[in-house]
Image: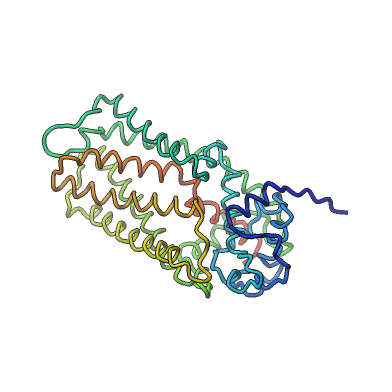
C-alpha cells in the first residue's frame, strides 16, 4: 500500500502561481496526447497534473519531466476543462528553483512581489558602499569617464567576487537538484545519470533550441528565446572583454571597436527577443502562457539592463551632464540580473540544461 502525504500548501502555491484550478482536472489524458515533446513511455504532463492535484510535492520537485516541457501551450489549448497544464508545470518550475535556492531567502527575494524593494535595494547599497570605499562617491568634473566614478579595479574585483559567491551558493542547490533527479527511474536503460555523457547528447538540442520547433500553438517562442539566449551570451562575452580591456588599460572602447559593435548587435538581439515576448504576453492569444510575476520580473529587468546600457553608451560619447546617474542605474540593473540569475526564471538556463542532461543520459527523449 502506498501512503500519500499531500502538501496542501504546495498545491495552493501552484494554483496561485498558475492561476489554475487543479480540482477541475478530470484526468482525460488529452494534454499528454497532444504534446509533441512528451515521450511515449510515462508521458507528461498527465501524471504531473495528478501529482499537483494531490499536492505531492516530492513527485514534482526534482522531476526531470517538469523541465522537458517547453511550455508550448498545446496542452492548454486542447484541455477540455481549461486547467492549463502548461501553466501548472511552469508554476512547478518556479517552485523548483525556489526550493533549491541556497541560501533560501534569495529564492523568496525574487519570487515575491512584496520583496522587490529589498531585492533592488540590496545591489544598490552594495554598489554605493563600494564606490564610497573607493573614495569616488561624487560626480567627477570634465568629460564623462565612468572609471573616475567607479574605478575599474574596484568594479571588476567586487563584481567578480560577488558573482562567484552567488553562483557558488547556487551550485549547492544545483547539486541537490541533480541528486533528486536520480530518484526518478524510467526503466529505459542507459547509464544512471552520468552528467557528461548526457550533456554531450543534449548540447546540440539546447544550442539550436530545436525542441521549440515541435510546438504547434505557440511556435514563435523559439525565435524570442533564441534571440534572448544568444544576445545575453554575447553581452557576457563583451563584458569579459571589457574587464580585460580595463585591466590592460585599453578601456574605454572606441565606437568602432569590434567588441563594441558586437555589444550593440547583442543589444538589438535582446530588444527584438524581449519585444516578441512582451507582445505575445500582452496579446494573450490562445495558447500563450499565463504571465506570472516571475515572468515579468525577468523581462523587465533584462529590458532595463539593455536600454540603460545603450543610453549610457550614448551619454559617454555625447558627454551628458547626468551620465553618471544613468551609469549608476545601469550598474544596479546589471548586478540585479547577474547576481540573481540562478534564483529567477532565467535560472531555466541552468535547471533545464541539468534536467535534460539527466533525461538524455537515461535515453528519455
Q: Indicate the quadrant containing the C terminus: top left, top right, bottom left or bottom right.
A: bottom right
| Residue 243 screen position, x and y as percent | 29, 41
The residue located at (11%, 35%) in the rendering is 142
The residue located at (68%, 52%) in the rendering is 11
Relative placement, left or right, of 233 versus 310 is: right
Q: Indicate how the structure is coloured in the image.
A: rainbow
Above or below residue 294? Residue 65 is below
Hey, which quadrant is residue 74 in on the image? bottom right
Q: Total label count?
A: 0
In the depicted view, which residue is nearer to us: 224 or 40?
A: 224
- In the picture as drawn, the residue positioned furthest to the left comes out as 142
In the depicted view, which residue is nearer to us: 235 or 197?
A: 235
The answer to whether residue 197 is visible is: no
| Residue 246 screen position, x and y as percent | 25, 39
Relative placement, left or right, of 297 versus 216 is: left
In the depicted view, which residue is nearer to us: 327 or 185?
A: 327
| Residue 266 screen position, x and y as percent | 31, 57
Q: Indicate the quadrant containing the N terminus: top left, top right, bottom left or bottom right.
A: bottom right
Above or below residue 102? Residue 50 is below
Above or below residue 112? Residue 68 is below
The answer to whether residue 149 is visible is: yes
Hey, which quadrant is residue 89 in on the image? bottom right
The residue located at (45%, 54%) in the rendering is 296
| Residue 191 screen position, x and y as percent | 67, 58
Relative placement, left or right, of 270 versus 10 is: left
Amino acid at each position: 500500500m502506498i501512503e500519500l502525504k499531500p502538501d496542501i500548501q504546495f498545491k495552493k502555491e501552484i494554483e496561485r502561481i498558475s492561476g489554475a484550478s487543479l480540482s477541475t482536472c478530470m484526468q482525460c489524458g488529452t494534454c499528454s496526447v497532444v504534446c509533441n515533446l512528451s515521450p511515449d513511455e510515462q508521458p507528461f504532463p498527465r501524471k504531473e497534473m495528478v501529482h499537483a492535484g494531490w499536492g505531492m510535492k516530492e513527485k514534482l520537485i526534482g522531476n526531470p519531466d517538469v523541465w522537458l516541457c517547453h511550455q508550448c501551450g498545446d496542452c492548454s489549448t486542447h484541455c477540455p476543462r481549461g486547467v492549463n497544464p502548461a501553466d501548472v508545470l511552469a508554476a512547478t518550475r518556479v517552485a523548483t528553483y525556489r526550493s533549491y535556492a541556497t541560501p533560501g531567502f534569495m529564492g523568496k527575494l525574487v519570487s515575491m512581489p512584496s520583496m522587490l524593494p529589498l531585492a533592488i535595494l540590496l545591489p544598490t547599497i552594495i554598489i554605493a558602499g563600494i564606490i564610497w570605499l573607493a573614495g569616488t562617491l561624487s560626480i567627477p568634473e570634465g568629460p564623462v569617464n565612468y572609471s573616475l566614478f567607479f574605478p575599474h579595479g574596484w568594479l571588476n574585483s567586487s563584481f567578480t567576487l560577488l558573482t562567484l559567491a552567488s553562483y557558488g551558493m547556487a551550485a549547492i542547490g544545483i547539486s541537490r537538484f541533480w541528486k533528486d533527479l536520480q530518484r526518478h527511474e524510467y526503466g529505459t536503460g542507459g547509464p544512471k545519470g552520468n552528467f557528461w555523457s548526457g550533456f554531450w547528447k543534449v548540447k546540440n538540442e539546447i544550442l539550436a533550441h530545436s525542441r521549440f520547433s515541435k510546438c504547434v500553438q505557440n511556435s514563435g517562442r523559439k525565435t524570442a528565446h533564441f534571440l534572448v539566449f544568444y544576445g545575453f551570451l554575447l553581452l557576457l562575452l563583451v563584458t569579459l572583454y571589457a574587464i580585460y580591456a580595463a585591466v590592460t588599460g585599453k578601456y574605454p572602447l572606441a565606437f568602432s571597436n569590434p567588441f563594441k559593435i558586437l555589444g550593440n548587435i547583442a543589444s538589438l538581439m535582446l530588444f527584438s527577443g524581449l519585444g516578441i515576448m512582451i507582445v505575445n504576453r500582452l496579446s494573450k492569444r490562445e495558447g500563450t502562457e499565463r504571465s506570472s510575476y516571475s515572468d515579468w520580473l525577468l523581462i523587465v529587468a533584462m529590458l532595463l539592463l539593455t536600454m540603460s546600457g545603450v543610453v549610457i553608451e550614448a551619454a559617454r560619447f555625447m558627454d551628458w551632464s547626468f551620465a553618471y546617474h544613468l551609469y549608476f542605474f545601469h550598474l544596479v540593473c546589471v548586478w540585479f540580473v547577474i547576481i540573481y540569475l540562478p534564483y529567477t526564471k532565467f535560472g531555466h538556463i541552468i535547471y533545464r540544461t541539468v534536467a535534460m542532461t539527466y533525461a538524455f543520459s537515461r535515453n528519455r527523449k
